[in-house]
């Protein structure tokens, strides 16, 4: 359900863009982002801090984009989110927590990786997030609006999935054991 709450606003944005253009898509996203959180709560799930922060950022940037009649704010949203996530990973590491270990440790509990491995994984996450943010900025500036919308909707999730798949495969190879179900 939490993944649906993440993907539904993006899907609504894409469909609304195809039907009515960027203005319609921004209004749709302005409604869809908080609605996804309400749906999570209504179904007994608790939104993550990241989901709440992203929804707040979306609402703010959508409102600014509409008030200023400038799409640059909404085009910058993925960059801001990716860079804030990278910063959160780095700050968490500085505070002695490792987000990569928190997320993946259950799957690799028997692997008994050392802190150096988990540190590298977390740093790779931060680097990938910084690169995705830079890619979004580059594409937002270089591509036509409709091409950016397609890249945002399909390209970024695909890149994220490829990065995670490669990283999990590399970790799995270190264990020489199949992943636990």
Image: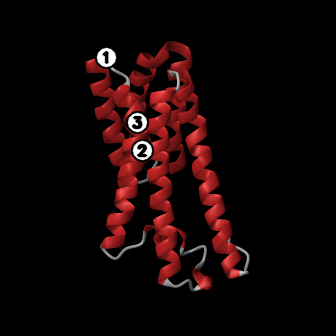
User: Which residue is at 57% across, 86% downward?
Assistant: 112
Q: CA distance from mark 1 to mark 3?
A: 20 Å
Q: Which residue is mark 1?
A: 69
Query: What distance separates the C-alpha of mark 1 from that of mark 2?
Result: 33 Å
Q: For the residue carrying disc 1, how many other residues have a C-alpha within 10 Å: few (<14), some (14-19), or many (20+)?
A: few
Q: Can you say which quadrant of the picture contains the C terminus?
A: bottom right
For the residues labelled 1 and 2, say whether their Cβ atoms are less than 8 Å apart: no
Residue 126 location in percent, x, y?
Answer: 44, 60
Question: Element at badge 1?
Answer: loop
Q: Which residue is mark 2?
A: 42
Mark 2 or mark 3: which comes first in sequence?
3
Which element type, helix, strand or loop, lies under badge 2?
helix
Q: Position of residue 7 (x, y in %)?
A: 53, 40
Q: Residue at x 35, y 58 (%)?
A: 87
Mark 3 falls on what kind of element? helix
Which mark is first along the chain, 2 or 1? 2
Image position of 122 with respect to 176: above or below: above
Q: Position of residue 163 (x, y in %)?
A: 60, 56
Mark 2 residue crowding within 10 angstroms, few (<14) / some (14–19) / many (20+): few
Inspect this view and state whether residue 99 appears: yes
The residue where tag 3 is placed is: 33
In the picture, measured across the screen, residue 72 lies left or right of residue 120, that is left
The answer to whether residue 1 of the structure is visible from this angle is no
> Which is more toward the observer, 132 or 152?
132
Q: Return the x and y of residue 67 as percentages of the image width and height.
A: 26, 19
Q: Residue at x 32, y 24 (%)?
A: 65
């Amino acid at each position: 359900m939490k993944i649906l709450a993440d993907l539904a606003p993006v899907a609504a944005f894409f469909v609304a863009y195809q039907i009515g253009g960027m203005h319609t898509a921004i209004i749709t996203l302005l409604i869809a982002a908080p609605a996804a959180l309400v749906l999570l709560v209504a179904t007994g799930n608790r939104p993550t801090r990241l989901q709440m922060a992203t929804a707040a950022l979306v609402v703010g940037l959508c409102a600014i984009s509409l008030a200023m009649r400038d799409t640059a704010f909404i085009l910058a949203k993925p960059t801001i989110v990716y860079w804030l996530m990278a910063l959160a990973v780095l700050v968490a590491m500085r505070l002695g927590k490792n987000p990569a270990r928190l997320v993946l440790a259950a799957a690799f509990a028997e692997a008994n990786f050392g802190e150096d491995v988990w540190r590298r994984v977390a740093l790779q996450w931060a680097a990938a997030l910084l690169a995705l943010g830079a890619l979004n900025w580059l594409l937002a500036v270089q591509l036509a609006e409709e091409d950016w919308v397609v890249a945002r909707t399909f390209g970024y999730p695909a890149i994220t999935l490829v990065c995670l798949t490669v990283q999990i495969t590399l970790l799995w190879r270190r264990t020489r054991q199949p992943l636990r179900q």
